[in-house]
Structure formats: structure tokens, C-alpha cells
Amino acid sequence: MVIGAVRAPRRREAAVTDIRREALTLPGVALGPTNPLPPLHPLDEAHRIDERSREGLPLDMARQLGYRPLTSVLPERIRDGYGRDRSPVSLDAIVIENDRLRATVLPGLGGRVASLWHKPTGRELLYRNPVFQPADFALNGAWFSGGIEWNIGATGHTTLSCAPLHAARVEAPDGTAMLRLWEWERLRDLPFQVDLWLPDGSDFLYVGVRIRNPHEKPAPVYWWSNIAVPEERRVLAPAEEAWHFGYTRSLSRVPVPVSAGADRTYPLNSEYPADWFYEVEDGRRRWIAALDDSGHGLVQTSTDLLRGRKLFVWGSGSGGRRWQEWLTEPGTGGYCEIQAGLARTQLEHVRLEAEGEFSWLEAYGPLAADPAPVHDAGDWGAAVGEVERRLGEALPRADVDAAYAAWLPFADAEPGERLAVGSGWGALELLRTGGKLAGTPLDESTLGAAQEPWRELLETGAFPEPRRVGPPGPTLVAPEWRDMLETAPARPLSEYHLGVAQWHAGDRAQAVRSWERGLELAPSLWPLLRCLAVADAAEGFAERAADRYAEAFDDLCAERRDGGEAWVAASAALGREAISALLSVGRVRGAREVWERVHPETRERGRFRLLEAELSLAEGDVPGARAVFEAGFEVADLREGAEVLAELWSRVAPGEPLPPAYDFRMRPGA
């Protein structure tokens, strides 16, 4: 048996690292249109704890748990236009390859590293998802599993999970080619970059990360590198304790590896989905590894700033297994996630000072260790020590620190050949401030249709009215843009956007006044009526909210011009909210009327089949509701942690077990 990472003598000839474009073809679905309704509702995020759970926490953790948590995903929109009928799709990919490793990166999907292939051993080091199947796990909806994901923004999966990043070729510190990814993260208005390179002869992928705060005020920062690996592994980290989060709104300190009678470092030893945030002592090398029965697998390590390490498991219970099938492909094996972050837990946000930056280096590569100590059930210290020794042989800690120091001067290097283009939002922000970002140019050439009206507001002081009727575009909600909207001419569309920005800022009364002013002259009423309906519901005026929703849907039906994507998306989004609002106040007939005017193809979607079952129950037609379940449906955008299917089934068939196809329960007692 070969112990330690497989290494070869360093080659003396010129560097041969290659970066090239490719296409990755696999079964998948289109992302579909973005939901055109601004997300005014409170953030739906499963990772929260009750106040009583904060007692007794370390002071820095308690402080960071309360440091400016996100309450909304504005200015982003919700991505819920995907389905589940898969067919071959072609994804743009960038391959980075040396003589030892081949990394496949998806720049159009958040820069995800979809594969990390070790050539000498013929091993895939990551969990490589055989399909592209979005699901409702990101802060703004669409997300997919597998590979290495770069999570920035706030607690949860980044809004960039299924969004394009800028990408270019840059020279690496050792003279090889380096891939740079960068974007402007809009929840916190922070630019970031991810530099990936493979030194010639190296078994490790190096990743340099930098987050900058170009503003005059401190900013909350969140970062977790999320690595999917096959779940039939033992996960090891240098920790004796961990913080456990089990989707029950509590955080508790538990021993590692055994807690509640089971060794939790084996993902299948847990019944329900859960997080373990490892308590790595200060001064200890930061790493996490997932190794199979033979002692082989992946190790991730970093410079010390990236302090947190985490294991997420789906568990062996029926709900976790169903989620595994849902996100991947039945019969292809499950996965768990090992992660690395800036804080102890993912419930925290770290303060980045004005005009400051965070930067660090990560390394990903193969590890081979003696399986006897690695899987010794009675000696955790020996298991950790074995991995730590093998990591030290394969990639000494000093080498990681040296690689970080060597990379830092290259972080500002101007990109060469452009390989992919991200959004124009960063370019718009730099146009507003007049700033520049060395190493990560956000050019005016990237400005598009979504940014154009905001550019006009910036340059003329007036927000343009649309030339044709259609769903409004996205709203910018940062204070600087809100100030510009407040001084702009009071036209219907500017009042609509101003109200959204005011709502986001917590000034609900002023938001309502802005929307009401917009109604007086607006040619298109439904966007404003829908906003007012959300405001009514938030204030407890459910009947008035239902009236507004019904009126908004009537106006949309009278206005929509065709069966195009934008109008179908608007009808689906508004129809769904209107039906729920009408049912909540017992107006079943009105809800049915909305249902019947939604596009026929929309009514066939799983989300609307679920609404159909709710409608049937409200009408007293229990057999009709049961027939919907028996016919089968899939809610493509079922939210992580959602229990609606189990709750509705308990009303349809009291006392009967939940059919396995609808069992997505993530916690005891759900």
C-alpha cells in the first residue's frame, strides 16, 4: 500500500499547465425565467436559531450571530423557473490541467468546480453530480449539488449559485497559467475573486480568494467553500468538539467523534440531516478530509484566516434519502459536504472594515493514509494524527503559507484572455462611484438591458418609463440608489422602485405611500397592487390583501399581451400568491377562478398541482385532493426544510403514512 498523497519528481522542463474551454454535456434542465415579482417577503432560510440557544455561546460567536443578518434577498430576484423534465444540456466549462490533476470549472454556474480528477490514481476526488438539476436551496432559489461551490453573501447558499461569473486567464506565481473568477456580490455589495492554479507537477489545486470592501463603512462578510464528496467516507478534522445544528433552531456543543451514542464522523450514522461545525483550536493547522475504507480520498487545507470546518450530512432516514435522489440521480450514490469558512459556524457574519480586504489560500488534493488508524473506532486522536502526518508529508503547512505569500502580489495582476463574462451590476456600481478594482475589471461593456434604466437615472436624475408594457425590471435598493429615486421625477415606475427600496430599508409606511402615488397615473396597475397586497398581509389585513391580489391578477390578465416567457412567469408568480392569499381568508371560489385563468401549461407544474390539492380540500373534495397525490407530482422548487407536503398529506389521509415520494422531512417530529 502506498501511504501519503501520490507524488512524482518535479519536472524540470517549462510549465505545462493548460487552461482551455470545453463543453460539459449531461442530463439537465434549463434554468427558466426569473420570477418577476420583487421578493418582499421575509427571507426563508432554514439556518436560524432561537434566542434561548444563544445563551452560553462564546462571546465572539454570539456577537457574530447577531451581526447584520440578512432579512431579504433584494436586490436579487428569485430563480424558480426550472422544472424536472431532464434532457441533454451543454454547459460551458473551463478545464485547468497539469500532469497530475484536471479541474473542470463551470463559470456560468457560480464558478463551481464540477470535477477534480487525479490522473495517477484514476480517482475522482469530488462527488461529481451526473445531472444538472436545480432545486430551491440558494438564498434566491436555484442551486444544484456536487463539486466545490464558493459561497459568499449571507447564511445559506449564495445567490450566485446559478449565475455567471467573469473569468480570464492570468499568470500564476510560478509562471504557469491561472484561472481568475470574479464578480460583484449584490447582497452585501462586495467584489470578490477566486484564483485557481495547478503548479506543474503538483497534486494540489491552489485557490487564492480575496474579498474587498471598497466602501466607507464596515461590511458583514460570509464565506464558506462547500465541497461535495461521496458519503461513504469518514470525515476527519483536528477537533475534539463541534457545534451541532439539526434544523430544530438550536445550536449545541457536542463531543467528536461520538455523540448521542453514534460516531457522527460517518455520514450514514445520522438519521436526519445535520451540520457539525468543528471547533478547531487556535494555532492548529486548518484542514478537513473525507477518506474511504482504504484510506483514500480528498483533503482540503488553508491558511489560518479560513478558520471554520464543517460536515453536513443528509443522514440515513427516509427524508434525507429522498433529498439525495431529488438532487442527484437514483442509484448513483449519495454525497455529504465538507466545508471551510471564515467563522466557526454558518450562522455568523464577520466584520470587514471600510476599504479593507480578506484574503487566504486553499489547497485541494488527494490523500492516502493507513486505513487502520483512520478507521479506529476507539482512538480518534490516532485517526486525526495519521491524517495530519500524511497531509504534512504531501503538502507541508509551510508550503501553503509560502504559496499564499507568493500569490498575493499576483492578486492585482490584470487579466489576460477573457474566458467568460458575468453580470453588469459591478460595472454599474463602479460607474456610480468612479472607483476601479485592480485585478478584477468590471467594464462598462458588460452593462446590459437590466442596468440601462439605472444608468439613465445615474446620468440624468430621472428613471425612464418603459416604451412597452411588461413586468418591471429589478430594483436596486442600496441607500445611494434609494436617494436618487427619492429626488427623481415622481413617475409611476420610479415610485414603484422607490417603494421597493423603502420597503427593503424598513420604512414600510413610506413604501406604501410611494406605491399608492404610483397607482394614480400608472398604465400598469398589477405590479403596484401586488406590492400593496404584500404590505397589507404583513400588517395583518388579510382580507384587504386578498382584495388587492384579486384586483392585481385581474389587471395582469387584461394586460398580458401573449404567451411569451415573461408574461407566463408573471402570471405564474402572481397567480400562486393570489390563490394562497384568497384561500387564507376562505375565499375558495375566488381562488379557483384565479387557478382557472393561469396558463394551462403552468397548471401542470408540480407547484400548481400542490395548489390544486389545497383547492380541492378547501372545496370539501377530499377524494379529489387525494387523487392529485395518487396521480403523482413533483414540486420542482420545493424549499429546503419545507414540510408542506407532509402537512397537506396529513389532512388528505389522516393517520396514513406519508408516501415515500413526498417524504422530504429534515427533522425529528416533522
Image (tube, grey):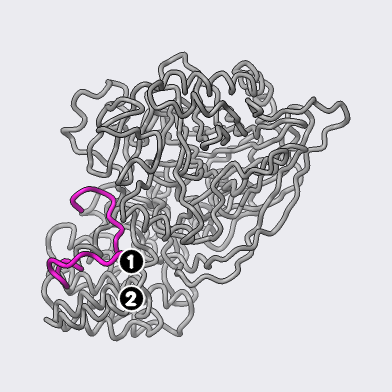
Can residue 504 be seen? no
Q: Residue 233, image x and y in percent?
A: 48, 39
Q: Do tag 1 and tag 2 residues touch (Cβ < 8 Å)?
A: yes
In the rendered image, the residue lying farthest to the top is 283
Is residue 663 within the magenta segment? Answer: yes
What is the quadrant of residue 61 in the picture?
Answer: top left
Q: Which residue occupies 28% across, 60% down?
A: 514
Q: Relative to residue 417, is residue 32 depicted above or below?
A: below
Count neighbours of disc 2 (C-alpha within 10 A) and say few if under 14, some if 14 to 19, many if 20 or more: few
User: In the visual, does 184 lie left or right of 44?
Assistant: right
User: In the visual, does 663 lie left or right of 236?
Assistant: left
Secondary structure predominantly adopted by residues drawn in magenta: loop
Q: Residue 27, image x and y in percent?
A: 57, 66
Spatial CA distance of label 1 from label 2 is 8 Å
Q: Amino acid at mark 2?
A: Gly
What residue would you read off at disc 2?
632
Identify the mark at residue 661; answer none if there is no mark. 1
**Front residue (pair 549, 306):** 306
